[in-house]
């Protein structure tokens, strides 16, 4: 799982930028939940960013997965897609196609 950090000093500029955070994952629900929690707890207007999760996992029957799904239903800016892909590059390309910004 990769992480992206963006620091913007100008508040007006920060409020005008739209960001898509694309997360491609495979059987990493225990890390994914913490990652999503961190992203939704940012001091950024929810309308200025979206979180796109492309989950290529084959183990969807666990508590960590259920927590991720509940969190994605709670926040309108999270798109959670479960889809089989042909590796990480394919997952990244699909995630970019799904994103809005």
Image (cartoon, grey):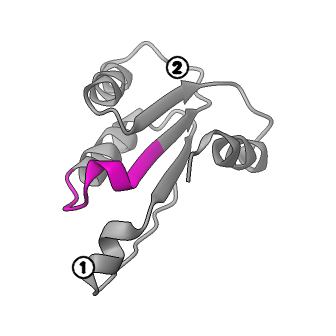
Q: Nearer the viewer, residue 73 or 87?
A: 73
Q: Residue at x 32, y 23 (%)?
A: 73
| Numbered tag placed on residue 59 in the rendering | 2
Q: Nearer the viewer, residue 40 or 2?
A: 40
Tell me if residue 49 comes above or below residue 5 in the rendering. above
Give the x, y percent position of residue 68: 34, 29
Q: Left or right: 90 with respect to 5?
A: right
Q: Left or right: 11 with respect to 62?
A: left
How many residues crowd around disc 2 within 10 Å: few (fewer than 14), some, or many (20 or more)?
few
Label 2 vs 1, first from the N-terminus: 1
Residue hosting label 1: 11
Residue 43 magenta-drawn? yes
Q: Residues in magenta?
A: 41-51
Q: Left or right: 79 with respect to 71?
A: right
Residue 45 magenta-drawn? yes
| Distance Cα–Cα, label 2 vs label 1 | 41 Å
Q: Judging from the image, what secondary structure is the residue with disc 1 in?
A: helix
Tell me if residue 27 comes above or below residue 52 in the rendering. above
């Amino acid at each position: 799982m990769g992480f992206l950090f963006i620091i913007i000093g100008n508040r007006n500029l920060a409020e005008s930028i739209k960001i898509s955070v694309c997360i491609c994952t495979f059987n990493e629900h225990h890390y994914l939940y913490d990652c999503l929690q961190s992203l939704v707890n940012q001091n950024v207007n929810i309308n200025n960013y979206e979180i796109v999760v492309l989950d290529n996992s084959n183990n969807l029957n666990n508590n960590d997965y259920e927590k991720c799904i509940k969190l994605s239903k709670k926040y309108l800016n999270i798109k959670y897609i479960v889809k089989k892909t042909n590796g990480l590059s394919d997952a990244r390309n699909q995630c970019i196609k799904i994103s809005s910004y």
